[in-house]
Structure formats: structure tokens, C-alpha cells
Amino acid sequence: MPIVVFTDLDDTLFQTAEKAAARAGDGPLIAAAHDRGGAPLSFHAPDQIALLELFDGAHLIPVTGRNGAALDRVVSPRFESFRITGHGAMIYDVDGAPLASWHARIQAEAMRLEPLFEALLRTLDEQFAPRAPAWRWRLIEDAAVPVYITVKAEANVPLPEAATLQSVLDARGLDDWRVHCNGRNAALLPPYACKAAAVRHLMELIAAQAPRTLFIGLGDSNSDTPYLKLCHFALTPRDSQIHQELWT
């Protein structure tokens, strides 16, 4: 039976050096992703390496907030199948090109919303300027398509509260947009940036060719929960956002 693993990346399969060291104890760290200059930025702890070994032979499909360029800086694991990026806004096919059945639909919607992205960025400029550079915000694009607005906080600086970010959307009546917060990262997500919708689309494509495929999901944050529910089995790391909300 074919096995397909839909997996989040950051804080699921790897994390920053500081988080990885705390997780690993005295164990070794293995570089998993590089920064734009090529220096190691994210690392596997030993338990994450063991998990990847457990899925040796499965088809590993990333489901990540990273865009295609940031995903290309991931050196471990390697992905040889489909790739879901931009919080579900983009799907790449096995050849590394945007999946045509998905891209045409997303591109049309993104073009319609482009002026809205610009307006939201101006609002953030006006409201958050006094907190820069401790807070940073910008538009993330993927395959030349605007996919979401990211808001980040520097180390030891709390993010804007989710309610504050939600008010930016509410002021424009954007009921179908979402705010996602985890750690020092937040995102203002348009309707088409939906991990579950992208996973469902690929499940349908895969099941059409291999109806008995086993689907497994891995994820750490609340934004992963909807696609984890679509899978036959779901895994979440200890002390993850999902774990804390369900078991603490």
C-alpha cells in the first residue's frame, strides 16, 4: 500500500538552533535548512531524524508556510513528489512547476485581490510604524503570485496580539481572511491560502491513481489541524501548539 505523508516543516521536522539544542539535550544537531547566504539556519534533533527514518520509502509532501524559494533552501529532507507552499496557496508538481489544475484558479483570485494586499500593507505601515523594526511585515509571493502577508517579531519581542491583527481585517470586512499566529510569526491569510484545501486537492489526484493510499499527517500548529483531520492518521510534536491546547 502506498504511503503519503503530508508534513509541516518548521517546528515539526526541524527548528532554529536554539530550539533544536533544547530539544536534543546532549544529542547531535543536523542542518536541515539554510538562510539566503547559505549558512545553516534550521536543524533536526535526533528524534526528528528517527521519525524521518521511520517514513523511509513513503512519499513525503511538505505542507508549509514557506514559499517555493524558501523551501528550496531546505536540504533535509529532500522532496521528490508534490510540494504545498504558501500556507496552501501554491502547489508544485513533481517536476517543480506550479500544478496547472491549482495554479490557474489561485492566480486569477490573487490578481483580483492584489489591490487589497497593497491596502492592507499601507494599514500596517500606518498602525505599526512606531514598533518597527521590532515588528516587520511584508508581502510573501510564490511563483509571482501574492500569497499572504507575514508579520514577524524580533527575539524577546511579543507579536501583535491576534485581536489586533484581526481588527485590520475586520475594518475591511474581510470575513473570509484568517489570522494565524505561532511563536514570533503571524500571517494574514487570504481565502485561497488554505492548507486543508491544497491537501484535499492532492489527495483526490493521488487517490484517483492509487485508491488504497494511506495518508498520514504531521503538523505542530493550529493551522495544520484542518489538513491533519483529512488524513488516516495524524502526528503532532510534544509541546507543539496543537499539543499544548489539547493536552495541557
Image (tube, rainbow, N blue to C red):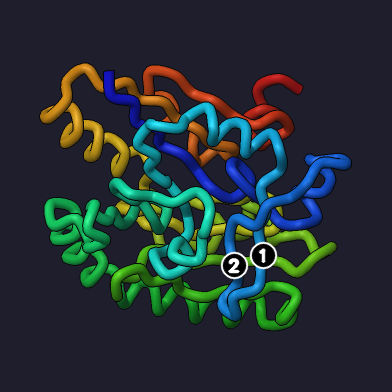
Task: Please say whether residue 201 is visible from this viewpoint.
Answer: yes
Would residue 56 be found to the left or right of residue 88 on screen?
right
Is 165 in front, or is 26?
26
The percent position of residue 202, horizontal first and vertical second, equals: 24, 39
Q: Residue at x 88, y 42 (%)?
A: 26
- Residue denoted by label 2: 34
Sequence-earlier tag: 1 or 2: 2
Q: Amino acid at mark 2?
A: His
The percent position of residue 60, horizontal first and vertical second, equals: 39, 39
Mark linked to residue 158: none
Mark linked to residue 41: 1
Would residue 135 be found to the left or right of residue 202 on screen?
right
Q: Residue at x 69, y 33 (%)?
A: 47
Would residue 105 be found to the left or right of residue 45 on screen?
left
Q: Mark 1 Cα within 10 Å, few/some/many (few <14, many 20+)?
A: some
Position of residue 69 relative to residue 57, above or below, is: below
Q: Amino acid at mark 1?
A: Leu
SS under mark 2:
strand
